[in-house]
Image (tube, rainbow, N blue to C red):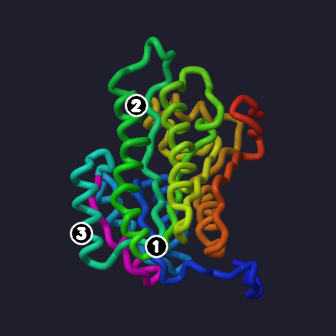
């Protein structure tokens, strides 16, 4: 690793901060956990797949000497979210940074042929889950007048594409909620940001196609998509800006992609 000289442009403002990451068991969430731990931040990691999160927590604690707390949490379960946040608040573990990462795309169908179960799954996770966690955490941030909420959006929340109407709608909602949170928190020192990636290779497409890995792999053929680490790098940048700087939206795509509909394949 190249050692850059310490300047105001390379300052690490994250050491000792506490970061809560939802959906931390894989993909962007796991990459964020790695990145923030390497920067010296303590972590609150939650996901439905608790075994993965616990393994990750053990490794990060050993490798970086940071404090890591884990929880099995389904963000679509409002009472469970409320109980979890009450628990961490009672333990004086309210995060400095909340990363609303838990989200998914399920199915790729014409609207009039779509699965209602898939729709409910996406709406419950991408919109309601984000709201449940935000509603529980933000009052604690307001009470102490500090904090940063980073919502993981998507370019799907800016440009609608065929067979993605409901997923698009959930990510357009994230865009609106991100801006709404910002406006409602004016006068406080709490920042709200979104990071909106384009094509990214994680478990995303496998989930979308209900575990069909061959179909998922075809999505990325002939391209060099973004990775979870690329997204985590951008999130780290957003979180590390000075407290008087609020990055509202950061949109990123692989170099081979310039728009939802403009993608070069080799």
Q: Earlier in the sequence, mark 3 or mark 2?
A: 3
Judging by the rendered image, the residue that carries numbered circle 2 is: 210
Q: Position of residue 103 (x, y in %)?
A: 44, 45
In the picture, the quarter occupied by the C terminus is: top right
Residue drawn where x is 37% and y is 69% of the image:
140
Local SS, label 3: helix
Check residue 240 in the rendering and tell me which mark sits there, or answer none: none
Q: Position of residue 113 (x, y in %)?
A: 44, 13
- Image side of residue 5 versus residue 71, left or right: right
Q: Which residue occupies the foreground of this view, 88 or 3?
A: 88
Q: Give the CA separation, mark 3 to mark 2.
A: 34 Å
Judging by the rendered image, the residue that carries numbered circle 3 is: 87
- Image side of residue 2 versus residue 19, left or right: right
Judging by the rendered image, the residue that carries numbered circle 1 is: 96
Q: Nearer the viewer, mark 2 or mark 1?
A: 1
Q: Are marks 2 and 1 in contact (CB under 8 Å)?
A: no
Residue drawn where x is 29% and y is 58% of the image:
50
Region in magenta? 57-73
Q: Which residue occupies the foreground of this view, 69 or 79?
A: 79
Q: Which residue occupies the foreground of this view, 76 or 26?
A: 76
Q: Which residue occupies the foreground of this view, 120 or 198?
A: 120
Local SS, label 2: loop
Q: Give the CA separation, mark 2 to mark 1.
A: 35 Å
Q: Is residue 194 above or below residue 225?
A: below
Q: Is residue 70 magenta?
A: yes
- Image side of residue 76 versus residue 199, left or right: left
Q: Earlier in the sequence, mark 1 or mark 3?
A: 3
Q: Is residue 102 magenta?
A: no
């Amino acid at each position: 690793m190249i050692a850059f000289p310490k300047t105001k442009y390379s300052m690490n403002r994250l050491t000792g901060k506490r970061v809560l990451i939802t959906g931390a068991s894989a993909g962007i969430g796991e990459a964020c956990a790695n990145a923030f731990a390497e920067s010296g931040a303590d972590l609150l990691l939650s996901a439905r797949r608790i075994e993965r999160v616990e393994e990750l927590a053990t490794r990060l604690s050993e490798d970086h000497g940071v404090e890591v707390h884990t929880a099995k949490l389904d963000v679509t379960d409002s009472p469970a979210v409320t109980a979890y946040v009450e628990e961490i608040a009672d333990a004086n573990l309210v995060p400095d940074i909340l990363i609303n990462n838990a989200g998914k795309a399920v199915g790729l169908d014409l609207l009039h042929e779509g699965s209602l179960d898939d729709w409910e799954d996406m709406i419950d996770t991408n919109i309601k889950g984000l709201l449940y966690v935000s509603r529980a955490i933000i009052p604690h941030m307001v009470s102490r007048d500090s904090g940063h909420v980073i919502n993981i959006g998507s370019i799907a929340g800016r440009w609608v594409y065929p067979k993605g109407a409901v997923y698009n709608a959930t990510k357009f909602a994230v865009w609106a909620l991100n801006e709404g949170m910002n406006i409602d928190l004016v006068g406080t020192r709490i920042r709200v940001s979104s990071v909106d990636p384009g094509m990214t290779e994680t478990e995303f497409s496998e989930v979308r196609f209900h575990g069909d890995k061959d179909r998922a792999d075809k999505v990325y053929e002939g391209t060099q998509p973004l990775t979870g680490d690329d997204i985590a790098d951008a999130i780290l940048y957003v979180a590390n800006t000075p407290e008087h700087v609020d990055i509202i939206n950061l949109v990123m795509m692989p170099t081979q992609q310039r728009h939802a509909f403009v993608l070069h394949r080799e």
